[in-house]
Amino acid sequence: MVIDHVGMFFLPDISLFRMVGRISFPLFAWLVGNGAHHTKNIKAYATRLLIFALISQIPYLAANRLVVDGFFRLNILFTLFLGTIAIYFLKVGINPVLKWGAPLVLAVVSHLIQADFGFTGVLMVVAFYVFYRHFRKTSLALSAIALVNLIASAKPGAGIISVDISQVIGLLALPIIWAYNQQQGPKAKHLFYVFYPTQYILLYAIKLLLKSRAV
């Protein structure tokens, strides 16, 4: 994620940075899907994601508007929050229409409110929960989501069709997920929550500093 953001803010002409960064979201989605299985209180889990999503939004917008005029999206924690709510319905849903319909509705909501990774981001979180410990099914689900992203990005022009392969790069997260040994690592549940907005604050400050020196 940091490599991705360094590339976006400071080295936009080097696409390798952005490509490496595409691996990060599937890993975050996987962590949320796993966390939803292990948490004793999924409502508290979702609430924590929402609180830090709100905290992160101003640094997220401020930093991104330094490189994209008028930038507006909701940060990735909103997507993870909506994915967690979708899992909640899967966990407690008695009515099958509500149980499976709610995740689709929340995926659409994520797209409409312009949350990062949008529709497919929520579906990815749900896929990691539904296919928990089924690596082959998880791989197929992520491949299908990547294909949807690929088709959605297709743009005809000059006699050819160009596509954005950056989201397909996210499939490189699968070997990392496959290597997971099912053992709990060091406990640092608030580390990412704090780190996420902090890195935007730092990127914002560094970008402003470099701009002031360039004047």
Image: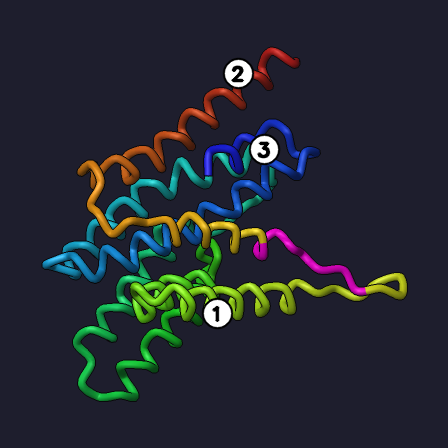
Q: Specify the amino acid type for callout 3.
A: Gly
Looking at the rendered structure, which numbered label has been put on residue 140? 1
Residue extending farthest to the top is 213
Looking at the rendered structure, which numbered label has been put on residue 7? 3
Image coordinates of residue 114 in percent, x first then y, are 48, 58
Q: CA distance from mark 3 to mark 1?
A: 30 Å
Q: CA distance from mark 2 to mark 1?
A: 45 Å
Asked whether the residues under the numbered discs 3 and 1 touch, taking CB atoms below 8 Å apart as contact, a structural biologist would say no
* In this view, the mark in front (2 or 1): 1
Secondary structure of the residue carrying tag 1 is: helix
Q: Crowding at label 3, few (<14), some or many (≥20) Cα neighbours within 10 Å?
A: many
Q: Specify the amino acid type for callout 2.
A: Leu
Asked whether the residues under the numbered discs 2 and 3 touch, taking CB atoms below 8 Å apart as contact, a structural biologist would say no
Query: Is residue 133 placed above or below 6 in the rendered structure?
Result: below
Q: Crowding at label 2, few (<14), some or many (≥20) Cα neighbours within 10 Å?
A: few
Query: Is residue 178 placed above or below 60 in the rendered structure?
Result: below
Image coordinates of residue 69 in percent, x first then y, are 60, 40
Secondary structure of the residue carrying tag 2 is: helix
Horizontal relation, residue 115 to residue 30: left or right? right
| Residue closest to the eye, 101 or 19 | 19
Q: Crowding at label 1, few (<14), some or many (≥20) Cα neighbours within 10 Å?
A: few
Q: Specify the amino acid type for callout 1.
A: Leu
* In this view, the mark in front (2 or 3): 3
Q: Residue at x 21, y 49 (%)?
A: 48
Give the residue number, with chain letter if any, for mark 2. Answer: 209
Secondary structure of the residue carrying tag 3 is: helix
